[in-house]
Each structure stands twice: as C-alpha cells, then as structure tokens.
Image: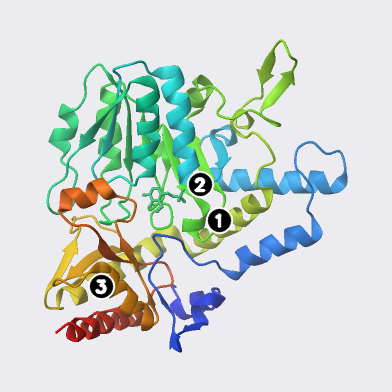
Amino acid sequence: MYDINRIREDFPILGREVYGKPLVYLDNGATTQKPRCVVESIADEYYSVNANVHRGVHFLSQQATNLHEASRETVRRFINARSISEIVFTRGTTESINLVASTFADSQMKEGDEVIVSVMEHHSNIVSWQLQAARKGIRLRVIPMNDWGELLMDEYERLFSPKTKLVSVAHVSNVLGTINPVERIIEIAHAHGVPVLIDGAQSIPHLKVDVQALDADFYVFSGHKVYGPTGIGVLYGKESWLDKLPPYQGGGEMIQSVSFEKTTFNELPFKFEAGTPDYIGSTALAKALDYVSALGMDSIAAYEHELTVYAMQRMKEIPGMRIFGEAEHKGGVISFLVGDIHHFDMGTLLDRLGIAVRTGHHCAEPLMRRLGIEGTVRASLGLYTTKAEIDVLVAGIERVRKMFG
Ligand code: PMP
C-alpha cells in the first residue's frame, strides 16, 4: 500500500518550515529531496569504507570498489540494461548528453549531417549539439508540437533524410510534463537506420523505464532528480554503440596501457570514466533506486498520475489560469500563468507562503518562444507530494491573484 504519511517520514526536510510556514516543496523537476537512507549512505561510506576504487590492493579499496560496482549492477537492473558494460557513471544528464554529442559527432558525423531534436528540449539537449554543430558543421532539425504540447509525429517522420545521423529527445518535458511517445519515436528512427538518445531526466523518477523494451540506443538521467545525490548520473548506451565511440576524456582508469608512443583504452564502461569516479555518490544513488523500487515504480506512477489529474482540475478552477502543456499523456509538471501576473511575482509571493515553485524559462528558451511567453511558474510533483499540498498551492495562487486585483 502507498502510505504517503510513512513515506514522508523518510524525508526529514519535508517537516521543516520556511517563513514560519510548513514547507510545500513543489520544485521536484529541478531536484528532489533525499530519503534518510540516501543521506546516511553518504555519511556511512565516508565514515567506514572510504578509499579510492579500482586501483587498491588494500581492504578498504576493495570494499569501496565492490560497493561502486554493485551500484552499477543496481542501475543496470533498474533500467533493465543487458550488461553492466552499458552503464557509464557521469556527473548527470548534462554530462551524459555532452559525452554522446562530442564522441558521436567526432566519430559518426561529417559536415552537413543532421541531428533531430524537439522543440521542447532542455538546453542541455540543444546546446550540447550546437557546440558540435559549430565544430563539425552539423545541423539541428526540430520536431514541432501542437498547442497541447504534443510532438507532431507526421512532421517528425518528414525530417528524416540520408543526412540524419541521430535523434535526441526528452522522454518527459520538464516544462509541459508531456510524456513523449518514445517507443514510436525510436521505432520510426530505427526504420530509417538512425539511433536514438532519450533524455530521461524527467522520466526516471516517475515512470518504469526498460531500455531494452524501448530499444533506446542511449538513455541518460541524473541521480539528484530520482531522490539520489547531486553530482552523479548515468549514461546507458547499447554496447554496440559505446564500442564504436571514442573516449570522451583522458585520464586514470580509462586506459589499458600508456606510453608516450601509444596508449590503449580500457574496456567498457571504464573507457568513458576517466579519473576518480564519484563512488560515494554511486552507492547513494543505488540506495535511492532501491528506495523507489521498494515503493514500486508502477505504484509511484499511479499515485502521481492521480495527483496530477487532481492538481490540473483544481488549478483550472482558478480564474485567469493559463496552463501550458495539456498533453493526453502528461506527468506531474504543471506550468502556468495567471492573468497578467508576472511569473517572478507569483513565484516570489508563493515562496512567502512556504510554497517552493520554480519560475522562468526552465532552461527551455526555444519552447518559451514557441509558446509566445518569457516564462512560467512551474509546480512539479514528487512521490511524497500530497493532495493537501496541492490545495495549499491553489489557495496560495488565489491569494496572489486577489492581491493583484
Ligand atoms: N534534461 C531535462 C529534461 C531536464 O529537466 C534537466 C534538468 N532540469 C536536464 C536535462 C539537465 O539535468 P542536470 O542539470 O541534472 O544535468
């Protein structure tokens, strides 16, 4: 059973007050709060195990290595990858996308080649490619969307040409909450012989993801958005693709042997993990994944879906409410504006009521341009959000609206 009160007790921060008001944390799209087991894992490992991984003969180093590699197996199981060779630890979604963009463009693309992205991408899935575009002379093609915030699949199909080398799209939009039809997106790309990278930053915390069922070529996400620590994330890549890509950074661990004449590289996944990895972070990330797995990703998804339906319905009762993103398949991200109240004013006043929301362009300026606005207020839900908190948000918005007359 999904016992929300019990679950909330696992997250000490949810019990605090801001400005003398109970915290209502609705900024989970930016980062999530951490359960006790994640925070304690970090302290425990520093207190009792800490040693650099992989290169040590001594006891602690071997224990730390075992924890780190067991965490890789936890990640593998969580997304159902075939092999731990396919799980590369990175700093997060951004670094994972940059790794693929850089190494894929270098080894698989030439001037005039194209990458397909969508209009609702986060900057990290736009700018990473633009850096390569400037360097290699490659071009971005953009999948448009309808006014509900759903990608236009016919237009998508029309973007393919022999120059198309990769498709890179978000599973769930961080602004609109749209759950994109990634199965179909991948199927279409594969029919054209083109691989697909899925930005899972906003899906991994909310949906059950099976990279083999999706047949994704690359799938990336951040630990901190799935109740894990900051500074660690994952790049999943099919072994056949990771084998084709050159190393991203040079340094310790990614080599097999080094001489001034010739250096050979380590096997997967270590080829992409130069330098000391965040082994404390990987253990804590595994704890976070174990935590959500114990609740059950399907239970989390069902709970959050009910909450999203409730929130959308309550928000729409507010006069002057404009919601951006009303896709049929939508996760718990609600972007809105009320009347002509500036998003920054709304966010600042809600904050004074103890309600943490995000305001601005949400690192998606091209999407803002498509919507014809400069920014929104965004409430994003998590596995510990309650209906009562939605009610506090709605009452808060009403109060701000009345203040502005
Ligand atoms: N993609 C999407 C869809 C996101 O929501 C975010 C974070 N807001 C990112 C990428 C970047 O994630 P990170 O900053 O953790 O690298």
Characterize the local packing of mark 3: few (<14), some (14-19) or many (20 or more) Cα atoms within 10 angstroms. Answer: many
Q: Nearer the viewer, mark 3 or mark 2?
A: 2
Q: Secondary structure at mark 1?
A: loop
Q: Residue furthest bottom?
A: 20
Q: Residue at x 48, y 39 (%)?
A: 96
Q: Amino acid at mark 3?
A: Ala
Most foreground residue, 320 or 37: 320
Q: Is mark 2 within 8 Å of ligand 1?
A: yes
Quadrant location, the C terminus: bottom left
Checking the image for residue 230, the label placed there is 1
Q: How many marks?
A: 3
Q: Are marks 2 and 1 in contact (CB under 8 Å)?
A: yes
How far apart are labels 3 and 1 at the CA level? 28 Å
How far apart are labels 3 and 2 at the CA level? 29 Å
Q: Is mark 1 within 8 Å of ligand 1?
A: yes
Q: Which residue is mark 3?
A: 311
Q: Which residue is mark 2?
A: 92
Mark sitting earlier along the chain (3/1): 1
Mark sitting earlier along the chain (2/1): 2
Q: Nearer the viewer, mark 3 or mark 1?
A: 1
Q: Does residue 157 appear left or right of residue 229 in this picture?
A: left
Q: Does residue 270 appear left or right of residue 300 in this picture?
A: right
Point out residue 121 in the picture as x, y percentages from the top left corner.
Answer: 30, 44
Q: Residue at x 22, y 52 (%)?
A: 368
Name the image quarter holding residue 164.
top left
Checking the image for residue 353, the label placed there is none
Q: Does residue 278 appear left or right of residue 375 in this picture?
A: right
How far apart are labels 2 and 1 at the CA level? 8 Å
Point out residue 172 in the picture as x, y percentages from the top left corner.
Answer: 32, 51
